[in-house]
Image: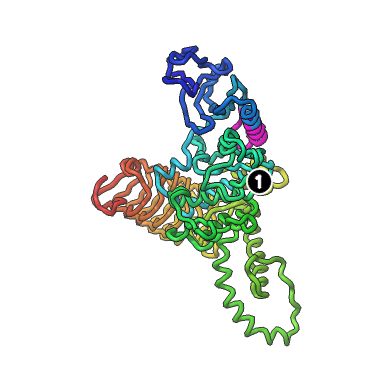
């Protein structure tokens, strides 16, 4: 089908090879090469279409964004042209990033403006939530772990996106990576005076402000900063956790703060990170994506640190006199943690820093290095490691570096060649876990015998667990997103609240497993054995269950027993 993009056309559908619209007479072939085949969306100031490029072999698919002013006055056309050229320059500047669509072409035709971009097939986060329900805490942390490096890259190019929201983030079908789209509101150069003095300019400028509810106060007042995108990312996180758009949430009438935390079951540490992302005052908000990444990185250590402070204080009181008698020298701490004010706290901070550095060094020796600035997402509240994970895909940005040039986690600093992590054996996994390690993401743990092992709260994101024996194991609150669990033995395992989104569980044995409140969004359960399994409250759809084996003893998500 050929689709007419004339906004006034009464019947835009036309035969495949028509040259002009049968209803309004408009030309159907843009720039003598682009044939529009479908409308994708429409807003107050433009529309997007799916098109094929007939000038290239194979006629590849692309997205055409049409910017169409509502009036033809010279002043408004000039403003539209400026907005159009600005978005084109921005996309050309940052489009080399693998999670930003490439700009393929742009042109003006009869007072209308067109951007041709790479087509990204997939689903928006808004569509995911509407279909699969809200995300878990682990899922939102994975989302932040992937999007924050992209945001960091964009900001490093002196670009403020200004319209971050679930509808502008697409999970690419090919590799499940999140792609950030719609850079039409990246910057605004229209003065406030112009906004209030011209209704036409107001209509144009409103398009470039952003989305109410997601945009912070300073952005709505036409004074966006990099931290404005941090706020919008925080609001997006709340949407993912609650399934509610900002307009459906309550606000504090005195401060304007969003009231989001009352009915959420998330850890205190993560709630504090979100709270600071959503500060109404720019001064008190995180100023950069790197600050948020660092906060997520430090969060899992806060519990153990606070628990140790009381015993530290008691020990220091008991040993203070003997220390003075022995005239031991005091070594000042090398760092400090915000919010810890006493000398005991700064001492603990120093020890915490030393512990983190020692842990990083040890992980590098075991083939699982952790970049100091890379993000991570915990599998559950209280998990001990949040390092080096994006939500999807094996390529992830690295803080302070362009992620397009450092796509791998384990890269030699001297040769630039990706390192191959050594495979852990079962005793090493159990020993490492008992010593406090929780991050086994991307590890090859296939065919190991981890029967009855306690690995609760562990991070196995994108790990290879093919045919691994987890029979009777405690895997509650683990992050197994995008893991390969095909043929794995999970009989009688505890997988309560486990995160298994996009996991491959084909042929896995889950007989008698406790899967209550587990997340199976987009997981492959073809041929998996769920006989006798408990799926109470699990995030799993009818099609997934139908692909698996069930029997009379299977407890379905609604709490009832029986075959599907």
| Residue located at (42% from left, 53% from top) | 469
Q: Is residue 147 above or below residue 44?
A: below
The answer to which of 550 and 268 lies nearer the viewer is 268
198 on left or right of 246: right
Which quarter shows the N terminus?
Answer: top left
Residue 86 visible here: yes
Could you say where residue 20 lies in the image, as x and y percent from the top left? 49, 13
Q: Nearer the viewer, residue 147 or 401?
A: 147
Identify residue for label 1. Answer: 411
For the record, the magenta segment spans 83-103
Residue 536 inside the magenta-drawn segment: no
Instruction: Give the tally of numbered discs.
Output: 1
In the displayed orientation, state which residue is furthest to the front. 197
Q: What residue is rendered at 39% in x and 51% in y?
A: 489
Colour scheme of the picture? rainbow
Residue 533 pos. (x, y %): 32, 53
Q: Position of residue 243 (x, y in %)?
A: 43, 49
Left or right: where 560 falls relative to 52: left
What secondary structure is marked by label 1? loop
Residue 184 visible to the viewer: no
- Name the spot of residue 398 as percent of width and height, x first: 64, 47
Residue 102 on the magenta segment:
yes
Q: Residues within 10 Å of mark 1 (few under 14, many from 20)?
A: some
In front here: 391 or 245? 245
């Amino acid at each position: 089908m050929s689709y007419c993009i004339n906004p006034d056309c009464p019947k835009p559908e036309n035969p495949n090879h028509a040259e002009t619209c049968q209803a309004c007479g408009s030309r159907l072939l843009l720039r003598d090469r682009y044939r529009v085949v479908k409308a994708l969306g429409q807003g107050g100031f433009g529309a997007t279409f799916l098109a094929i490029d007939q000038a290239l072999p194979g006629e590849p698919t692309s997205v055409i964004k049409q910017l169409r002013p509502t009036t033809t006055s010279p002043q408004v056309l000039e403003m539209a042209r400026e907005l159009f050229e600005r978005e084109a320059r921005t996309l050309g500047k940052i489009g080399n990033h693998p999670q930003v669509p490439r700009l393929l072409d742009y042109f003006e035709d009869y007072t209308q403006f067109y951007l041709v971009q790479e087509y990204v097939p997939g689903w928006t986060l808004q569509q995911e939530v509407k279909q699969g329900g809200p995300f878990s805490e682990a899922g939102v942390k994975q989302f932040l772990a992937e999007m924050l490096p992209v945001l960091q890259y964009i900001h490093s190019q002196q670009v403020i996106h200004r319209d971050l929201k679930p509808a502008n983030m697409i999970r690419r079908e090919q590799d499940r990576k999140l792609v950030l789209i719609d850079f039409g509101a990246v910057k605004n150069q229209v003065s406030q005076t112009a906004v209030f003095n011209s209704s036409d300019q107001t209509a144009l400028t409103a398009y470039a402000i952003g989305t109410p509810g997601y945009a912070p106060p300073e952005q709505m007042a036409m004074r966006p900063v990099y931290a404005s995108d941090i706020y919008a990312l925080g609001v997006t996180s709340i949407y993912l956790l609650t399934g509610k758009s900002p307009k459906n949430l309550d606000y504090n009438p005195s401060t304007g703060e969003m009231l989001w935390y009352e009915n959420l079951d998330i850890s205190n540490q993560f709630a504090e990170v979100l709270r600071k992302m959503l500060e109404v005052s720019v001064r008190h908000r995180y100023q950069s994506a790197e600050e948020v990444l660092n906060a997520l990185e430090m969060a899992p250590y806060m519990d153990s640190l606070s628990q140790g402070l009381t015993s530290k204080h008691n020990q220091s009181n008991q040993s203070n006199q003997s220390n003075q008698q022995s005239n031991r020298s005091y070594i000042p701490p090398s760092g400090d943690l915000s919010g810890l004010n006493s000398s005991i706290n700064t001492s603990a901070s120093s020890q915490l820093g030393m512990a983190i550095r020692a842990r990083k060094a040890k992980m590098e020796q075991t083939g699982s290095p952790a970049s100091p600035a890379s993000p991570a997402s915990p599998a559950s509240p209280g998990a001990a490691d949040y390092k080096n994970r994006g939500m999807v895909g094996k390529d992830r940005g690295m803080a302070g570096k362009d992620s397009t040039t450092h796509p791998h986690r384990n890269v030699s600093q001297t040769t630039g060649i990706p390192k191959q992590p050594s495979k852990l054996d079962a005793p090493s996994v159990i020993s490492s876990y008992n010593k406090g390690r929780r991050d086994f993401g991307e590890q090859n743990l296939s065919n190991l015998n981890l029967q009855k092992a306690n690995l609760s709260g562990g991070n196995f994101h994108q790990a290879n667990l093919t045919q691994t024996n987890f029979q009777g194991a405690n895997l509650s609150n683990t992050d197994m997103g995008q893991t390969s669990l095909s043929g794995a033995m999970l009989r009688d395992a505890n997988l309560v609240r486990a995160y298994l989104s996009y996991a491959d569980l084909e042929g896995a044995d889950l007989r008698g497993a406790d899967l209550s409140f587990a997340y199976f969004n987009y997981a492959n359960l073809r041929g998996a054995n769920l006989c006798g399994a408990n799926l109470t409250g699990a995030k799993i759809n009818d099609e997934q269950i139908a692909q698996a084996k069930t029997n009379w003893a299977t407890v379905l998500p609604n709490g009832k027993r029986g075959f599907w």
